Image (cartoon, grey):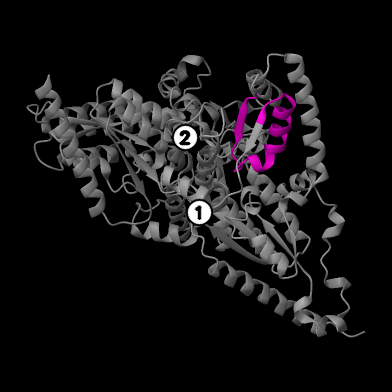
């Protein structure tokens, strides 16, 4: 029997959940085809096929769907509604399968299981089970594949998180004399906070992470903050955030503020509704931590890099200059 | 204690009932104006939606007039509305105001806050008095919406331009002052008979349009640049699909039984084929209402949305397909802080012309 080809557009929430789906479907004997990382072609496809008012990440998602469309038998677009108590995904993600279905005609069949842990049909197990039934009729195999891939997903997800002890800012450990000699080389910690699909998509963020690394910056991301710390940090808020993806971003940003990294860059995308609110919360918090430099980068369809380069350089120059002054003011005893 | 409420259409009619009569001091928030908008836009996050900005403008104006407590509605997502109060609070604290925010929402775990808030609003009066007052306020809202909906039918048929709006305004002032249900009944009768006087019953067949979309923008005339009036003067009967009644009705009526959600169910079913899951806000309702408007035989639908509104953008994307499938014209108007009206007028007029031509064609063919 021919293997069924299932396409996964590598965008939006798949940055987080792709390993789970991939392992599950592969174990069942389906062929998983992942779209290529974002490139000009994909972005153009997305922009052309969606409304101009839709936010950038969704446009990118459209592009990935279209780039896969003629290679696969099915397209996997789960309807992610709720994966933790009291929090949802953004409205556009909840409506994503319907948006894709209505605006892209003549597309291959879409598999859209509902993931909503509040409902019995929407638990991870049940929604993966539904998808599994498309591939094989052997329900025992599906159950086995689910528990194996779920376990791996949980384990790897936690393994990716850094030990919080490595996050100590470098300032205290630096020998002041040698630091003054090699000024531009002072290692600095910059936390880049934002959604996974912005941080990890180097085409959309104009290769920001690599650029920072090349400038001798230790880059920290929300993925490095353990979930329990995120939870603790969110208690500072007057009202809990009800978006799963933004919870992580905000909690991580608050954590990095408290741990005095040198700077925080908040990545947002044009028209993103969550970011517009969360950005304000982080901005508000930043005013209580004047020692931490804070800036916000908004990304849209434009791919010119000069603007972003200037902003990164200015931001780093500012931090390095401040640091130099701090060091030279350190008493010599 | 000086309290203030943000504006939303004519909702100020209940201010006296639930604030002044409960022994609080009321800070009258000035009507929405360019100044409100400017203040709101200056201090809100850039990509936030318009309702947040205008409400923030209201709050700043109220605080300048000495308000100490601000009353705001809340929610639990996924629409951004549920988070307005938090962001506004942060912004206002950053601006250095000293105030307390009373967020009215169905609590999640924090029942004590709700209890405290209710007690602040109760202000030491007896429970029966409070319930009485809130029931009166609810009746006022119902009457207000009834008259507003009526005026949408009267306006395109009025004998003299502007008469119906004036009559509505007068009765709103009366409703605001009313202290009991009997007076409300009287006002209703008076206004309806007045409407009858100013209506030209010769005009019967008119273009009928459903007004769907985001709640605040569709109900607050300032934010949608008086769209209902504009359409009315163009000779269009507007059928308003959003209402405060449908929004807080199920809570106010305290009917936990299924039948109080009957209308919502119907809308949901109509939308199901296109948008199978609620996306927060009025996203699914908008799609459902357009399908229902088609079934009711209206000529078209106008969707009003604030710029960057998340649920409505989902609906807008889907409406394109709905409109194609049902052969039913829809127009989406996006509002932001721009106050130029000519572009808007041209688009509305073109849309109405299109509907008129369409109708002629249908008549000729049949």
Q: Residue furthest right?
A: A333
Q: How many marks?
A: 2
Position of residue B311 in the picture relative to residue A233 (left or right): left
Residue found at x 9% / y 40%: B160
Residue found at x 39% / y 26%: B288
Inspect this view and state whether residue A308 appears: yes
Mark 1 secondary-structure assignment = loop
Inspect this view and state whether residue B122 appears: no
Residue B138 percent coordinates (x, y):
41, 30
Q: Residue furthest left?
A: B202
Mark 2 residue crowding within 10 angstroms, few (<14) / some (14–19) / many (20+) = many
Mark 1 and mark 2 on one chain: yes
Residue A12 percent coordinates (x, y):
60, 43
The magenta segment? A3-31
Residue A125 percent coordinates (x, y):
71, 23
Give the residue at mark 2. A99
Which quadrant holds residue A329?
A: bottom right
Q: Quadrant of the N terminus of chain A?
A: top right
Q: Quadrant of the C terminus of chain A?
A: bottom right
What's the CA distance linking mark 1 and mark 2?
A: 19 Å
Position of residue A91 in the picture relative to residue B178 (left or right): right
Mark 2 secondary-structure assignment = helix
Mark 1 residue crowding within 10 angstroms, few (<14) / some (14–19) / many (20+) = some
Residue A9 on the magenta segment: yes
Which chain letter matches label 1?
A
Which chain letter matches label 2?
A
Earlier-in-chain disc, 1 versus 2: 2
Give the residue at mark 1. A270
- Front in this rendered view, residue A188 or B213: A188
């Amino acid at each position: 029997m021919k293997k069924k080809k299932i396409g996964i557009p590598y965008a939006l929430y798949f940055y987080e959940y792709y390993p789970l789906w991939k392992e599950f479907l592969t174990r069942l004997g389906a062929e998983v085809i992942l779209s290529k990382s974002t490139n000009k072609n994909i972005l153009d496809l997305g922009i052309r096929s969606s409304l101009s008012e839709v936010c950038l990440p969704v446009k990118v998602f459209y592009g990935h769907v279209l780039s896969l469309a003629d290679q696969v038998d099915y397209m996997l677009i789960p309807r992610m509604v709720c994966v933790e108590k009291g929090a949802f995904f953004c409205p556009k993600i909840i409506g994503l399968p319907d948006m894709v279905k209505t605006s892209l005609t003549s597309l291959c069949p879409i598999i859209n299981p509902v993931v909503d842990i509040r409902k019995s049909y929407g638990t991870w197990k049940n929604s993966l089970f539904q998808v599994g039934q498309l591939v094989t009729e052997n329900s025992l195999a599906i159950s086995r594949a689910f528990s194996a891939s779920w376990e791996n997903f949980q384990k790897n997800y936690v393994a990716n998180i850094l030990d919080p002890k490595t996050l100590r800012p470098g300032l205290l450990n630096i020998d002041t004399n040698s630091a003054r000699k090699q000024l531009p080389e002072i290692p600095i910690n910059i936390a880049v906070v934002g959604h996974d699909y912005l941080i990890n998509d180097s085409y959309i963020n104009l290769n920001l992470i690599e650029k920072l690394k090349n400038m001798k910056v230790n880059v920290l991301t929300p993925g490095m903050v353990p979930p329990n710390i995120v939870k603790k940090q969110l208690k500072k808020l007057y009202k809990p955030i009800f978006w799963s993806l933004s919870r992580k971003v905000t909690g991580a940003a608050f954590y990095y503020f408290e741990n005095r990294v040198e700077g925080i860059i908040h990545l947002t995308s044009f028209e993103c509704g969550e970011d517009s609110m969360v950005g304000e919360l982080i901005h508000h918090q930043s005013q209580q931590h004047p020692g931490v430099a804070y800036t916000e980068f908004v990304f849209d369809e434009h791919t010119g890099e000069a603007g972003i380069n200037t902003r990164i350089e200015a931001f780093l120059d500012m931090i390095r200059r401040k640091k130099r002054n701090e060091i030279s003011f350190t008493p010599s005893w | 204690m000086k309290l203030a409420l943000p504006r939303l259409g004519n909702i100020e009619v209940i201010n006296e009932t639930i604030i002044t009569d409960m022994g609080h001091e009321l800070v009258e928030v000035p009507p929405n104006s360019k100044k409100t908008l400017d203040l709101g836009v200056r201090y809100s996050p850039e990509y936030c939606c318009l309702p947040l900005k205008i409400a923030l403008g209201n709050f700043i104006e109220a605080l300048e007039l000495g308000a100490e407590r601000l009353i705001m509605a809340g929610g639990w997502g996924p629409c951004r509305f549920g988070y307005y109060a938090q962001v506004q609070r942060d912004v206002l604290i950053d601006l250095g105001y000293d105030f307390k925010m009373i967020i009215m929402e169905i609590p999640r775990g924090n029942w004590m806050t709700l209890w405290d808030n209710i007690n602040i609003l109760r202000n030491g009066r007896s429970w029966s008095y409070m319930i009485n007052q809130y029931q009166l306020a609810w009746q006022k809202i119902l009457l207000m919406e009834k008259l507003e909906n009526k005026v949408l039918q009267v306006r395109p048929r009025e004998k003299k331009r502007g008469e119906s709006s004036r009559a509505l305004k007068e009765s709103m002032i009366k409703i605001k002052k009313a202290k009991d249900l009997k007076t409300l009944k009287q006002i209703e009768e008076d206004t309806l008979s007045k409407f009858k006087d100013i209506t030209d019953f010769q005009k019967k067949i008119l273009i009928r349009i459903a007004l769907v979309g985001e709640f605040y923008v569709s109900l607050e005339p300032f934010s949608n640049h008086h769209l209902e009036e504009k359409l009315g003067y163009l000779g269009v009967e507007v059928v308003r699909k959003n209402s405060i009644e449908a929004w807080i009705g199920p809570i106010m009526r305290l009917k936990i039984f299924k039948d109080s959600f009957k209308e919502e169910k119907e809308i949901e079913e109509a939308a199901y084929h296109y948008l199978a899951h609620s996306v927060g806000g009025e996203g699914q309702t908008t799609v459902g209402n357009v399908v229902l408007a088609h079934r009711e035989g209206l000529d078209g639908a106008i969707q009003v949305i604030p710029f960057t509104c998340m649920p409505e953008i989902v609906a807008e994307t889907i409406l394109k397909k709905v409109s194609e499938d049902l052969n039913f014209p829809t127009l989406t108007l996006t509002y932001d802080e721009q106050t130029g009206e000519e572009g808007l007028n041209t688009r509305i007029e073109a849309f109405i012309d299109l509907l008129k031509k369409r109708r002629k064609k249908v008549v000729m063919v049949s």
